Image: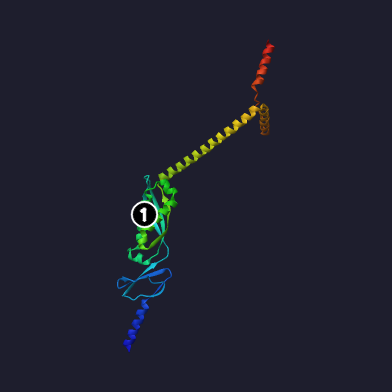
Amino acid sequence: MYTVLIVVSLVVLYLLNAIKVLREYERGVIFRLGRVLAKPKGPGLIFVFPPIDRIVRVSLRIVVMDIPPQDVITKDNVSVKVNAVVYFRVMEPQKAVLEVQDYLFATSQLAQTTLRSVLGVVELDGLLSEREKLNVQLQEIIDKHTDPWGIKVQLVEMKHVDLPENMVRAIARQAEAERERRAKVIHAEGEFQASHKLKEAADIISANPQALQLRFLGTLAEIATEKNSTIVFPLPIEMMKAFSMGKKETTD
């Protein structure tokens, strides 16, 4: 009787120990006598019979993996440090377990080497201004190499580009020079347009001399509003000639 109770208790404990509960985002890859079963188990209640069975739990949630700063030498021989983040998830649990020893470590190493190789063939200006294009290129390359492992890389984003201090100063000087160049170009274009308008105004005034007198009177009115104590009157040369001719006749 006691022997039967002991046997029953051991069987119950064994069955209880064989019960496993997998969460909604988990799948269990079962190895039975060393051979993997046809389909992953889960989610929910499953039975794993040790020591015949061995279970490997695989999460199907998106993994956010940080790529540590990598030393990159750009195409124009500038040394920078670049770090990034990779978003991926396991699509086929069996491949993630069977095809690679540690898919997390393997994906991390692949992302690091891909980051150095891709950024090493672009110039610094392209690295700073074409991040979206480089992110897409990184995502495609990493996804292609991790596809045999049952992994889907959804997004790769460069987080920070750490430049040497001398390069930061050089870029600042370059930006300042570019702003000065644009300011000079805008000023020159303004002078060019103003010269055309002045030429048109001069043509109109030359066709009607009374317009010059009106412009002169308008200028005097503007000066008077500023409460100046000194006003300069420009005299036409013809008026001076008239005074000189009158003086000459008096002398004669």
> Does 206 appear above or below 49?
above
Residue 101 occupies quadrant: bottom left
Quadrant in which the N terminus appears: bottom left
Q: How is the image coloured?
A: rainbow
The mark tally for this picture is 1
Q: Is residue 25 left or right of residue 206?
A: left
Quadrant where the C terminus sits is top right
Name the residue at the bottom extreme. Answer: 1
Percent position of residue 120, x then y: 37, 49
Q: Looking at the image, can residue 110 be seen?
A: yes
Q: Is residue 250 above or below residue 132?
A: above
Residue at the (65%, 19%) spot, across then down:
240
19 lies left or right of 179:
left
Q: Residue furthest left?
A: 33
Mark 1: give few (<14), some (14-19) or many (20+) Cα within 10 Å. Answer: some
* Amino acid on which disc 1 is placed: Thr
| Residue marked by disc 1 | 114
Considering depth in this image, is 44 or 223 the residue closer to the camera? 44
Question: In this rendering, does residue 228 appear at all?
Answer: no
| Location of residue 50 in the rendering, given as x and y in whole percent from the top left corner | 32, 75
Q: Is residue 163 above or below residue 92?
A: above
Residue 95: quarter of image: bottom left
* Residue 214 place in picture, x, y as percent: 68, 29
Judged from the image, the secondary structure of the residue bearing numbered disc 1 is: helix
Q: Residue furthest right?
A: 250
Picture coordinates of residue 69, whole percent (x, y): 38, 54
